Image (cartoon, coloured by chain):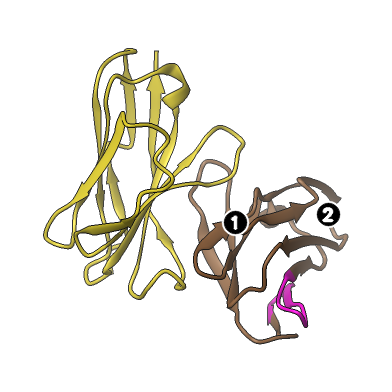
Chain colours: A yellow, B brown
Amino acid sequence: GAGVSQSPSNKVTEKGKDVELRCDPISGHTALYWYRQSLGQGLEFLIYFQGNSAPDKSGLPSDRFSAERTGGSVSTLTIQRTQQEDSAVYLCASSPLGTSGRRYFGPGTRLLVL
Amino acid sequence: GQQVMQIPQYQHVQEGEDFTTYCNSSTTLSNIQWYKQRPGGHPVFLIQLVKSGEVKKQKRLTFQFGEAKKNSSLHITATQTTDVGTYFCAGYDYKLSFGAGTTVTVRA
């Protein structure tokens, strides 16, 4: 079946612009996660959704970052007034169960802020 | 909060040799998961360990969960070029925390 999809696959933007990153999880997966991976680094947790609610937003680095999920499915991560340090790969993952379950990762969106 | 440490950060291996990467948690874990990320790719789930002292094998990969459920290891035998990538462990207590990964390169 279809895996997690993300769009766009690549995004180049200018400093100060807003960007929206989209994640389409596996159908039926109630949990959705956003991670950030800087070049050569590990996975930095950003936010977790259970259904449309976000019980854990502790990883969002600043108030420029926000995310929403609608219909228990698609999620959008928005970064306002982008900065060069926001350049990274943004990975979305979903899981069918709670937070203890395995993550199914999407291919990521590679964001470059000039 | 929970911390998951992985060592080594980098592993350079001669093709055909064995190596082990280690994962240590500051807290007792309910489960530990391992993922592999190929260069330019995304993390892909390999395995989950739940029981104290559990050992699981996938072909040339052997995964072990420590008796105290605070550490884990991944041992790869007869390394091949297809083993290149970054291996992440992720430990779950009340939250899943990823280690920084071990990046493996292979000399042919």
**In the image, is residue B92 above or below residue B102?**
below
Q: CA distance from mark 2 to mark 1?
A: 38 Å
In this picture, residue B38 sits left or right of residue B70: left
State the residue at coordinates (60%, 82%). B50
Magenta-drawn stretch contains B63: yes
In this picture, residue B78 sits left or right of residue A65: right
Depth check: A109 or A78 in front?
A: A78
Q: Which residue is mark 2?
A: B15
State the residue at coordinates (74%, 69%). B71
Whether marks 2 and 1 lie on the same chain:
yes
Q: Position of residue A103 (x, y in %)?
A: 44, 64
**In the image, is residue B72 above or below residue A23?**
below
- Tag 2's secondary structure? loop
Q: Position of residue B80 (x, y in %)?
A: 75, 58
Mark 1 surroundings within 10 Å by alpha-carbon count, few (fewer than 14), some (14 through 19), many (20 or more):
few
The N terminus of chain A lies in quadrant: bottom left
Q: Chain of mark 2?
A: B
**In the image, is residue B104 above or below residue A82?**
below
Magenta-drawn stretch contains A43: no
Q: Which residues are magenta?
A: B57-71
Q: Position of residue A114 (x, y in %)?
A: 39, 12
Q: Amino acid at mark 1?
A: Gly
State the residue at coordinates (22%, 72%). A28
- Tag 1's secondary structure? loop
Q: Amino acid at mark 2?
A: Glu
Mark 2 surroundings within 10 Å by alpha-carbon count, few (fewer than 14), some (14 through 19), many (20 or more):
some
Say whether disc 2 or disc 1 marks the residue closer to the N-terminus.
1
In this picture, residue B86 sits left or right of residue A25: right
Q: Which residue is mark 1?
A: B1
In this picture, residue A90 sits left or right of residue B68: left
